[in-house]
Amino acid sequence: MAIDLATEATFTPEPGSFLVGLDSDQYPDSWEILLGDTAPAAPDAVLAAALLALADPPSGGHIRVTSTLPVGAGLSSSAAFSIALLLALGRAPDPMSLAQLNQRAESAAGSHVGLLDPLAIVDARAGHALCIDFGTAALERHQVAIPERAAFVIVHSEASRELGLSPYALRRSECDAAAHEIGRPLGHCVKTDLSVLTDPILRRRARHVVTECERVREIERLLAVDDLPGVGAAMSDGHRSLRDDYRVSITEVDELVDQLQRTPGVLGARMSGGGFGGCVIALCDQDSPALQPATYAPRRAWRVNPSDGARIVAED
């Protein structure tokens, strides 16, 4: 689901110029990117340079980025930045096209990510979660209503992470190896298919993917019958699987999940994003004390709601 934290990009074109200036309230430095330049960009501007190369704007100009999303927190900040910038540069708001451009730019910047984050950002609808079936060629998607009484809080572990520098790519390659050995995508498998995997590491990685797909289907069913305690239990099961089978959690995140799960009114909690740090999201009752962000200081925390996705705010 999209949340009511956001990244906004404003592009002011300068006809005849081939230079793009970029500044963001998330970074102290500003950057200048020459359109068509093949020289390496500054480390913090690599993603922006890749997006500009793909978007191919007719002229240079100035890009101003503001955001309430923390960077490197497992809340899809890079995907939010990418989608905002692509829309500001005039790309059509087609979910699949934008998601694929985001994926290509992230890959060029050293992060080999999937399509889940940008698709959710573009296709999200307020009050709903987005179900994406990656087992279908067209990546079929549909909206799943979230009961109004569901309340969410996100708490930062304050352990920052960067997918390009973490074992995230290794986990993907392990899943690819497991799928190759089984003979079909893990999303099409059931737990009994894992018996052919002789490597215990590949078996654990594949078991996470297979059981996570089962949890997605189960959570959709539970949301339809307004069984929020069941949804929370599935979320907590998902974190245990991420911790034990997929091995993408860390001590700081596990301790925060445990703290939240012990808090009255918390129905379930799990890490968010690709792992190795970042945030935890908890599903709560409306009267849970866990919903008070100030109680987590000095950690940052936000009470969030399932919100509409990316859109054009204004254009000339």
Image (cartoon, rainbow, N blue to C red):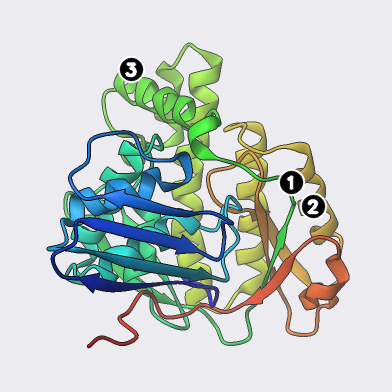
Give the CA distance from mark 1 to mark 2. 5 Å
**Picture residue at 38% right of the left edge, 73% below the top:** 124
- Mark closer to the chain start, 1 or 3: 3
Instruction: List the residue tagged with mark 2.
Output: 256
Image height check: is 177 above or below 57?
above
- The residue positioned 55% from the left and 26% from the top of the image is 204
Gap between marks 3 and 2, in whole Å? Answer: 36 Å
Say whether residue 131 is visible. no
Counting residues from the start of the chain, the first of labels 3 and 2 encountered is 3
The x, y position of residue 184, in whole percent, is 27, 29
Front of the two marks 1 and 3: 1
Q: Residues within 10 Å of mark 1 (few under 14, many from 20)?
A: many
Q: Which residue is mark 1?
A: 253
Mark drawn on residue 275: none
The x and y percentages for residue 299 are 80, 60
Residue displayed at 32% across by 69% down = 122
Q: Which residue is mark 3?
A: 181
Q: Are marks 1 and 2 in contact (CB under 8 Å)?
A: yes
Secondary structure category for the residue under label 2: helix
Residue type, numbered disc 1: Val
Q: Position of residue 146 (x, y in %)?
A: 51, 79
